[in-house]
Amino acid sequence: MYSRSWRTVCAEDSVGSPSFVSDHGLWDEEQFAAAERIEAGLVQLDLVRLVFPDPHGLARSKTLTADAFRSVLRNGMNFSPGPFLFDTGHAIAVDFAGEPGIGVEEITGAGNFILVPDPLTFQVLPGSEPRTAWVVGDEYLRDGTPHPLSSRAVLRRLEQRYAGHGHAPAVGLEVEWHLTRLLDGGAPGNEGNGFGRQGGAPRVAAMNPGYQFNLDARYDSVAHITDPLAQHLLALGLPLRSMEHESGPGQIESTFAPMSALDTADAMLLFRTAVKRWCARRGHHASFMSLPRLDSFDPGGWHLHQSVRDAASGRNLFAAEGPAGGPSPAAKAYADGLLAWHRELFLLAVPTVNGYRRLDARHPLAPTRVDWSVEDRTVMLRMVGGSTGAHIENRSGEPCANPYLALAAQLFAGLDGLEGLGGPESAPRAAGAQAQFVPQSLGEALAAFRAGRADRLLGAPLAACLAKLKESELRRYEAWCASAGPGDDGVTEWEHREYFEAY
């Protein structure tokens, strides 16, 4: 039997710093009240999964005993910065042994940061055994300042800017993903796996032939998985509205009611993680990769539905004014901001090599044209509705984008349009033939990101970090293509290994 003193020393060693939350004023009254409720209910739990989104938008976590979490809740937890350093294939993209080159001294030597649970995101996972909860954390430096590489902090700052204008953005999710049946027991390959070398993707079989859009029989072929999954998502508190069968084999679309920006990003993080876990435990594989390397699959997108309301009255600023209808001046200004910034920030909406497979003229509904239009699905921005439900649908994103950064990019650009700065600091609308279409490759988007002013949104450290991560990913892809020789211009084995299992 271990002594009480040994247990206490280990518990203290795991926490970030005693009274870290209180000492640095990190919570508001609502969060403190939620923390008290959590503490009272920990006796009914066994484990708590403390997660945070890495720069790629993947959930990184540690699973704590409920007793250990009791100390971590108010003190934070030490966490390695590894998730900030690795690209999508786990290659080290940010040097931590020497000069990282991103302006964050704490990365040198890979020293810990402090991860603080946000009590407002605490959620008991229904039906879990052992009894397990999930909570999202915020990253902080040891001096109590938000970590410069925290994507959740970026979105929180944007929400505060909107609040300063008396505005409240609302965002609705529309996400397409692929459901397949696992073969060979579902184990992915690990031959040749390592840092920057992903093993074989899971072997899967299609759920149905696809290509009967919204056909009830196609949905019925997946309903034994998607119907109980829908009930599970509702039990998690996610505002699910619909499950639909799209065009490709086993291609599912899930839609959600509008939420605040931070709640939407948190919901997307939980949704993707929960869907993959739920399906895997039932012998199936869910992937948010845009276009897997599977016969006749159709690329999937992530449509972001956006509106802005007056925080005091609740009035939708995008609603048409007068009987003539049409987009309001505010909606047009917001859309102009999105269009003006689209090239510089497109990397945040479509951050993978594979995501650009969808943005091709071969796909008739691909939102490749940089424009806005009323009820037109071939342009980047679709204006929907004219009354209280009026909103803008940006159709360009891919389902595995970092939700915090993707949403922050939209809100930042839209607010720039609403503010109507118009001066030299405002993003000008690009000119020329290239500007008529969204970027067509990760390389093109990365070049625009590097040449632009993404640091105005992200801060210089995160902008530099993302550029290094994406450059590493792109270099590895290009090296693979060079060694593999000419292909058929389809999805490569490299892409399938890199994204199909992880996303």
Image (tube, rainbow, N blue to C red):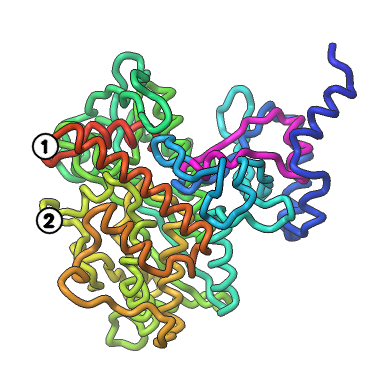
Residue at x 46% of width, y 72% of height: 308
Tell me the amino acid under the disc marked 1: Pro
In magenta, the rendered stretch is 58-85
Q: Secondary structure at mark 1?
A: loop
- Residue 165, by quadrant, is bottom right
Q: Find residue 361 and name its label.
A: 2
The residue tagged 1 is 486
Residue 151 percent coordinates (x, y): 52, 54
- In the image, is residue 242 above or below residue 311? above
Residue at x 59% of width, y 54% of height: 104
Residue 79 percent coordinates (x, y): 64, 39
Residue at x 33% of width, y 80% of height: 428
Q: Is residue 74 magenta?
A: yes
- Residue 492, by quadrant, is top left
- Count of all numbered marks drawn on residues in the image: 2
Mark in front: 2 vs 1? 1
Question: Circle 2: is it few (<14), some (14-19), or many (20+) Cα within 10 Å?
Answer: few
Viewer-side residue, 229 vs 202: 202
Tell me the amino acid under the disc marked 2: Ala
Q: Is residue 376 visible?
A: no
Residue 116 percent coordinates (x, y): 68, 47
